[in-house]
Image (tube, grey):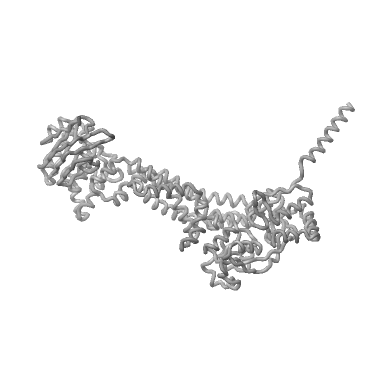
């Protein structure tokens, strides 16, 4: 599913990543831990092609999407519009099919009553769920999550764990690759966790 | 000697030309300015665009207008009418400012929005049309209002070459009746009313954005 | 007491004398200095036929002549409001103009001409209204040519310009089918532009005169001077110097 081969990256003359490799073959929830500033977010962005790779290769076998730490919803779109918009360019489904699929996902995420709201009226947890829905809607099979637990309270974190498992084991069969400082969280959801060390 | 009402009606006929020139220049300058701002964002054609902006911001609008009206027909087999020559001059001149407005608006947009667009595989054209430009425009809206107010006053330039707008009709009636003060005030009032209308509608549109946010 | 009053009288007397020496009487002429050879700017100074005439008139009135450069369409308004004492600027004496200003007698009779690009229209074409649906002719805003065109060829659309050179450019670039200027001006333009041709349309019945405010005291004085200048062939000499 995901092969990272000897990735190196230099940023402002500082070497951030030095010949790092990892491999993911099975579906599941995976974690990436490491010290602050070691380059976890950068690595995640490189998988999604949001940052350039200096040397090495990344092979991705499935469609990926990115979950931002600050969610990055489109502020001038409603929840429904945020979820549906990108999927228009991926599939040839009719308007009705799109709408049905979106509503189902939002229902699973307990957001059906917020369908016509704008992002600025949502809580952090709700915004995160909209971001998930958006990624699921375009058919991503590997969702890269950048610090998903930051700013969440205990209840929301438990909720998040439930969501991750339900999407992994449910119809969509979505895998997750999570970058986090929260070791307890990674311990409870990830089947395997990788460590990113500072280059010497 | 015409009464004030007759003078007002006479000068008022120029409102049509002033407004149509304003609308045409506005649309053209935004179209051209958007293209240039997007090119600059993708770092394409930076030098030509910068030269273009430098020339059109660095020379007076009067001279640009005379150039389009008198010089272009001599060298290109294309003779724009006074309306189109003025529209082009105002549009090209304005686009230099529009590009700047949009460029600063783009810079204030969080880079995460561009990253989100990329991670959702949204095609560039639609991303700009539905996601980026609408947000940028909401951000720079006060600058757009300022630009519009300046533009509607700049349309008076067409009077220099005989275009019968508000300003020219004021000059015509002034030459005819040898009065200056009354027609001048009337002409000024027409422009003032147009500016008030622009600000009124901007306010309404701006409030609509605010409600959404 | 007597000595003091004598000296104060002396002081007042000298003061009174010197006052009239310091403050020369002046006459302000308005002119639109963009119309060679009658009035134009050369090396920073306003010169021309009208300028020489105005200077001579000032000399004979024993007044200092000051010139103010004003756009043509604003001249009569300036006379009316008192900004200038008189306007001399190839102003044709017309009935309409006499409603708001007084005029001296005429000092020059001018011809009207049609200026075209390579003779692309003939004099007769002016009367043919079918030709003028989509074409325009250029004239100066507020000029007697504008009035003349409206009276004689009302079916022809006019484009009103502020400067004669703009009319020339518009003809050269094809925006206008022709322009109506006075004969002197258009002859000079034709000399400078080989492609332009001018056609004589007729002599104006009215000639150029100097505009004055209504009920101006100067009118009679200047008229007398103009009569003298004509007798002395001064106007002929000016004509030879500037126009031929």
- Left or right: residue C91 versus residue B157 is right
Q: Which quadrant holds the N terminus of chain B?
A: bottom right
**Image height of A132 relative to C113, above or below:** above
- Left or right: residue B15 versus residue C20 is left
Residue at position x 50%, y 50% in the image: B61
Residue B28 x %, y %: 41, 54
Residue A45 x %, y %: 22, 40
- Kindly tell me whether residue B14 is visible in this rendering: yes
Residue B187 x %, y %: 55, 51
Residue at position x 14%, y 42% in the image: A3
**Image height of C202 relative to C225, above or below:** below
**Image height of A92 relative to A140, above or below:** below
**Image height of A160 relative to C58, above or below:** above
- Kindly tell me whether residue A106 is visible in this rendering: no
Q: Which residue lies furthest to the top in this view?
A: C1
Residue C66 x %, y %: 71, 48
Residue C162, quarter of the rendered image: bottom right
């Amino acid at each position: 599913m995901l092969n990272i081969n000897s990735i190196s990256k230099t940023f402002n003359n500082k070497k951030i990543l030095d010949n790092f490799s990892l491999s993911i073959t099975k579906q599941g929830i995976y974690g990436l831990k490491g010290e602050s500033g070691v380059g976890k977010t950068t690595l995640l962005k490189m998988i999604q092609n949001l940052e350039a790779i200096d040397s090495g290769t990344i092979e991705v076998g499935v469609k990926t999407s990115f979950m931002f730490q600050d969610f990055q919803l489109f502020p001038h779109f409603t929840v429904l519009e945020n979820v549906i918009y990108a999927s228009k360019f991926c599939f040839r489904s009719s308007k009705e099919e799109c709408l049905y699929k979106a509503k189902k996902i939002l229902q699973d995420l307990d957001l059906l009553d917020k369908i016509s709201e704008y992002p600025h009226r949502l809580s952090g947890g709700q915004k995160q769920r909209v971001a998930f829905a958006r990624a699921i809607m375009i058919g991503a099979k590997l969702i890269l999550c950048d610090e998903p637990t930051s700013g969440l309270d205990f209840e929301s974190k438990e909720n998040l764990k439930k969501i991750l498992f339900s999407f992994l084991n449910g119809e969509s069969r979505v895998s997750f690759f999570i970058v986090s400082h929260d070791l307890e969280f990674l311990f409870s959801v990830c089947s395997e966790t990788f460590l990113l060390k500072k280059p010497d | 000697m015409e009464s004030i009402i007759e003078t007002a009606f006479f000068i008022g006929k120029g409102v049509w030309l002033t407004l149509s020139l304003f609308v045409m220049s506005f649309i053209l300058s935004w179209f051209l300015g958007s293209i240039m701002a997007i090119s600059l964002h993708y770092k394409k054609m930076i030098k030509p665009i910068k030269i273009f902006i430098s020339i059109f911001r660095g020379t007076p609008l009067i001279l640009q207008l005379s150039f389009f009206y008198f010089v272009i027909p001599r060298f290109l087999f294309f003779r724009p009418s006074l309306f189109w020559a003025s529209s082009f001059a105002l549009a090209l001149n304005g686009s230099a400012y529009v590009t700047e407005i949009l460029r600063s608006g783009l810079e204030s947009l969080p880079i995460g929005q561009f990253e989100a667009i990329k991670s959702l595989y949204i095609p560039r054209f639609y991303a700009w049309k539905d996601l980026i430009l609408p947000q940028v425009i909401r951000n720079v809206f006060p600058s757009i209002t300022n630009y519009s107010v300046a533009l509607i006053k700049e349309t008076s330039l067409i009077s220099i070459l005989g275009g019968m707008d508000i300003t020219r009709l004021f000059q015509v009636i002034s030459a005819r009746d040898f009065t200056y003060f009354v027609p001048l005030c009337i002409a000024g009032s027409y422009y003032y009313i147009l500016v008030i209308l622009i600000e009124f509608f901007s306010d309404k549109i701006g409030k609509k954005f605010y409600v959404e946010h | 007491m007597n000595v003091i009053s004598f000296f104060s009288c002396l002081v007042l007397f000298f003061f009174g004398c010197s006052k009239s020496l310091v403050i020369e009487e002046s006459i302000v002429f308005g002119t639109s200095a963009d119309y060679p050879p009658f009035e134009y700017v050369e090396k920073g100074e306003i010169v021309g036929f009208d300028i020489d005439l105005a200077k001579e008139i000032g000399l004979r009135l024993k007044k200092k002549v000051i010139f103010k450069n004003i756009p043509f369409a604003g001249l009569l308004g300036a006379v009316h409001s008192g900004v200038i004492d008189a306007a001399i600027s190839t102003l044709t004496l017309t009935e309409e103009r006499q409603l708001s200003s007084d005029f001296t007698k005429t000092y020059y009779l001018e011809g009207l001409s049609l200026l075209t690009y390579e003779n692309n229209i003939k004099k007769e074409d002016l009367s043919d209204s079918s030709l003028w649906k989509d074409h325009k002719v250029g004239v100066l805003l507020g000029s007697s040519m504008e009035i003349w065109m409206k009276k004689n060829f009302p079916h022809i659309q006019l484009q009103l310009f502020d400067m004669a050179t703009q009319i020339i450019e518009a003809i050269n670039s094809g925006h206008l089918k022709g322009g109506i200027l006075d004969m002197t001006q258009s002859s000079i333009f034709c000399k400078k532009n080989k492609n332009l041709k001018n056609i004589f349309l007729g002599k104006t019945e009215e000639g150029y005169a100097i505009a004055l405010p209504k009920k101006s005291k100067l009118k009679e004085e200047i008229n007398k001077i103009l009569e003298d200048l004509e007798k002395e062939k001064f106007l002929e000499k000016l004509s030879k110097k500037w126009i031929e």
